[in-house]
Image (cartoon, helix red, strand yellow):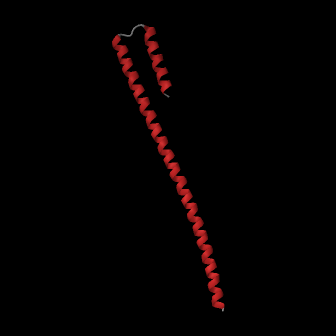
């Protein structure tokens, strides 16, 4: 992305240089604009990297939550089996 902005800036500078009508003030303005574009590109890149890091954290949290849910379901299944076994033992003791 940064290369694209540099290439565009270079083409703009080349176009101005070929026309021969640019004053030193115009060149300074162009350099200032180029600096602003580069700064904005850097900010956008940093924001994108921060967003990617946040997305990775969210993905890790979702995976951890899925694992905890799976474990809870397994414990619930085991508890249900134990309850059924206890019920059978209770019913057998009541028959005696």
Q: Is residue 83 above or below residue 29?
A: below
Q: Residue at x 35, y 16 (%)?
A: 28
Rendering coords of residue 81 (x, y %): 63, 74
Q: In the shown orientation, is residue 84 left or right of residue 48?
A: right
| Observer-nearest of 20 and 10 | 10
Image spot of residue 63 (x, y percent)? 55, 53
- Residue at the location (61% across, 69% down)? 77
The vertical placement of 42 against 86, above or below, is above
| Number of numbered markers | 0
Quadrant location of the C terminus? bottom right
The picture places residue 72, in percent across and down from the top left corner, at: 56, 64
Question: Looking at the image, which residue sits at the far bottom?
Answer: 96
Name, please, the residue furthest toward the top.
Answer: 20
The image quarter in which residue 90 lies: bottom right
Q: Is 30 on the left or on the right of 61, as rendered? A: left
Residue 4 horizontal/vertical position (percent): 50, 24
Say which residue appears at 40% left-offset and 28% top-offset.
Answer: 39
- The residue under the point 54% across, 60% down is 68
Q: Is residue 20 above or below residue 61?
A: above
Residue found farthest to the left? 25
């Amino acid at each position: 992305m940064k290369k694209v902005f540099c290439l565009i800036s270079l083409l703009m500078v080349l176009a101005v240089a070929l026309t021969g009508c640019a004053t030193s003030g115009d060149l300074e303005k162009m350099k200032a604009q180029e600096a602003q574009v580069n700064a904005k590109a850097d900010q956008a890149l940093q924001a994108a990297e921060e967003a990617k890091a946040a997305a990775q954290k969210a993905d890790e949290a979702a995976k951890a939550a899925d694992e905890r849910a799976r474990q809870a379901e397994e414990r619930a299944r085991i508890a249900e089996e134990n309850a059924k076994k206890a019920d059978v033992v209770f019913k057998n003791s009541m028959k005696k």
